[in-house]
Image (cartoon, rainbow, N blue to C red):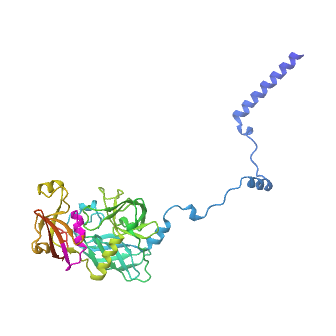
Amino acid sequence: MLKRLWLIFAQAVTVALAGLFVVQTLKPQWLQQTPWRQPSPAVTARTAQQIALPPSPPASVLRAGFSQAARLAAPAVVSITASKAPSRADQAHERFFGFPFGPRQPRSGPQRGLGSGVIISADGVLLTNNHVVEGASDIEVMLADGRQAQAQLIGTDPETDMAVLRIDLPDLPVIALGDAASLQVGDAVLAIGNPFNVGQTVTSGIVSALDRSQLGINNFVNFIQTDAAINPGNSGGALVDADGRLVGINTAIFSRSGGSLGIGFAIPVDMARQVASALLRDGVVARGWIGVETRELTPELAEALKLGGDAKGVLIAAVVAEAPAAKAGLKPGDLLTRIGAHPVHSPAELLATVAALKPRSEAEVAVQRAGKTLSFQIAVGQRPTPPRTQDD
C-alpha cells in the first residue's frame, strides 16, 4: 500500500513539472505577478509624509555664472560696420594680432570691416579700435536692441589703436567704467562683441596676465591678457569684470589659425579713458618727443664703453637732426640717466616718460659722457604722427 502511494505521488510530481515546463515555454505571461494597483489616497499621504522632498531653490541659487554682469554690460556693446576702399596690402600679419576685416575679401570691391564698440556716455560717445575704422568712408553702428545709426569719427590714436566715435540716438545704454588697476591675475572677466558677424556674443575667462608689453602691437599700452575667447569681429568690444563694469577694450589675439587660442589682449580702460578725453578735447593725443634713438644698456655694452658695472640708463644710439635733443646738445654715445625727476633704466621707460611730457614744455635731461655727468635743458616737441602703412 505504501509503495503504491509513493508511486502515485511520484507520477503526480512528474506531471506537474511537465505542465509547468509547458506553460513556461508556451505561455510565460501566465506566471507573471499580479499588476501593480494604484494605492489608496490614505496610503499615498502616509508615503509622502515619510519621504518628504525639499522645495526647489530659487532661480538665483540655481544659476552659477555671470548672467547679471552680461545683462548689465551687453546693451552698451555695439556692432560696427566700416566701409573701406579696396586694399592691396597683404594682411597675413593679422592672423597674429588684430582682425580688422576677418576673412580676406575680393580686391575688386570695397571692403566692409566688422568690429565692435562700447558706448561710454549718454550723449553717444563710443570707444573702438583704430584698426576697425581706419580709412573708413562710412561707419554704421548697430545697437543690441536693433537700432542703427551712422557714426561720426571724432578722432583716432594709432599708437594706442584707439578711436572715438559719436552717434545721435535717444535713450542710449551706457556701460559703467571699472578700474583696470584693481584687476588681479585670476579675476573672472567677460568678452562681449560680434565675432565673425554672428551677432552679439559673450565669452568668459580670467585675467591671465597684466602689464603685457613689448608685443609689437603698439608703443604705449601695457595690455591685459585674457583667455576669454576673442575672435575676428571682437576688436573694439568690451572686456568686463564680474560686476559688468568695463575694464578693457578687446584689441588683438595671438593666433596661428585665425581663431582664438586663449591668448587675447585688451587695452586697459584707464588708458582708453585718457585717450578718449584727449581726442574729445583736442582731436589728437599730444605726446612729448625729444628725437633720439636708443639702445638698452647691456653689461657687454657698459664694459665696451667703459661705463662701469653699476652704470644705469639708456644708451643714445642716434639723434634726429634738428630735433629737440640735437638742439640741446645731446650726442650719440651719451648715457641718458634721468628726465626731470624721473630716472630711466630702459628704452620703454624712456619712451613712456618722454611721451608724458607736454609739448612746448621744458625738461631737464641728465646724461653721462666720457665719465662726466652733464645736464641739458630740452624744449620738448610733439611726437610726430607715425606714418600710415601703405597698401603697396
| Percent position of residue 390, x then y | 17, 69
Q: Where's the C terminus, which quadrant?
A: bottom left
Q: Quadrant of residue 142?
A: bottom left
Number of callouts? 0
| Percent position of residue 226, x then y | 37, 60
Stretch in magenta: 342-364
Q: Quadrant of residue 322?
A: bottom left
Position of 183 compared to 384: left or right?
right
Q: Is residue 170 above or below residue 299?
A: below
Q: Residue at x 11, y 55 (%)?
A: 304
Q: Where's the N terminus, which quadrant?
A: top right
Q: Quadrant of residue 110?
A: bottom left
Q: Residue at x 50, y 62 (%)?
A: 65
Q: In the depicted view, which residue is nearer to us: 210 or 356?
A: 356
| Percent position of residue 261, x then y | 35, 56
Q: What residue occupies the far right of the structure in this picture?
A: 1
- Any part of residue 357 in sight: yes
Q: Is residue 80 above or below residue 228?
A: below
Q: Is residue 360 above or below residue 220?
A: below
- Any part of residue 107 in sight: no
| Percent position of residue 51, x then y | 71, 53
Q: In the depicted view, which residue is nearer to us: 250 or 384?
A: 384
Q: In the depicted view, which residue is nearer to us: 261 or 106?
A: 261
Q: Residue at x 13, y 72 (%)?
A: 325
Position of 359 compared to 173: left or right?
left
Residue 316 covered by magenta stretch: no
Q: In the depicted view, which residue is nearer to us: 37 or 160?
A: 160
